[in-house]
Amino acid sequence: PSIATALDDAATDGTPVLELGPSVDPRSFPDGSPDPHIWFDPVRMIAATRLIADALEALDSTTDWSANAETYAEQLSETDHQITTLIGGLGADQRKLVTNHASIGYFADRYGLEVVGVIIPGGSTLANPSSAELAELIRIIDELSVPAIFVETTESDELALAIAGETAQPVTIVELFTESLAPEGEPGDSLTSLLLVDAERVVAGLAIPAEADS
């Protein structure tokens, strides 16, 4: 069953269900469907953390959920500050993103980046882009001199590599953690670490002049 069906079934069975997305000012995909990737905005995640603490407090008052939530909120706030500083090192002409699928819109919105192209249309990784859509994406990359395509660690980079092979200038393929954490003990094995690792990779990818990446 889908996640939505599983949640509906849980609620029907009397299991407490907390829907965070609608409560943290969600963004939408161009087709109007909600973008679920709220974890890419630390500020929204601070709000989500407090909502979770409130819900847990209602179920179990023996733990100081609020204090724990505020400790984690401070970590998220510091992460947000670090990412803002990192992204601040990019020039106005170095902030254009092309991604494998529409996964980092919240991140782009939060830190003043612009997603100018997506390989797989819509919010699903299962959709297939048409030849015309791929040709248009190649044109955009060339016209805007986008130096990198960002792909997920959990998805194939086959299409990204094919596109990079057709552009007029060299394009780097950069992996980001989007749908899952890194293995335990490695950079990216927690949400705050994941966000920082991804921010560092975004900055490194966008800071490369296209003509110099050979």
Image (spheres, helix red, strand yellow):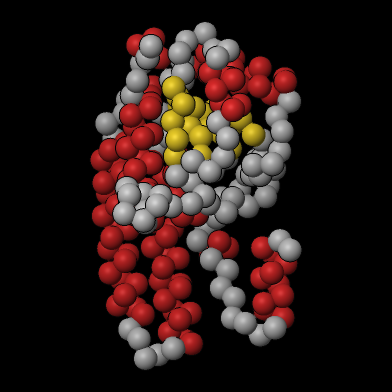
Residue 56 horizontal/vertical position (percent): 45, 81
Residue 164 horizontal/vertical position (percent): 53, 18
x 40%, y 90%: residue = 61
Res 7 quadrant in image: bottom right
* Position of the C terminus by quadrant: top left
Q: Which sits in the foreground, 201 or 118?
A: 201
x 59%, y 50%: residue = 35
Res 31 quadrant in image: top right
185 vs 126: above or below: below
x 40%, y 37%: residue = 112
Q: Which sits in the foreground, 122 or 155?
A: 155
Can residue 41 be seen here? The reply is no
Q: Which sits in the foreground, 81 or 214?
A: 214
Can residue 50 be seen here? The reply is yes
Residue 67 horizontal/vertical position (percent): 29, 77
Instruction: Please state if 177 lies on the left or on the right of 141 as rendered.
Output: left
180 vs 1: above or below: above
x 42%, y 60%: residue = 45
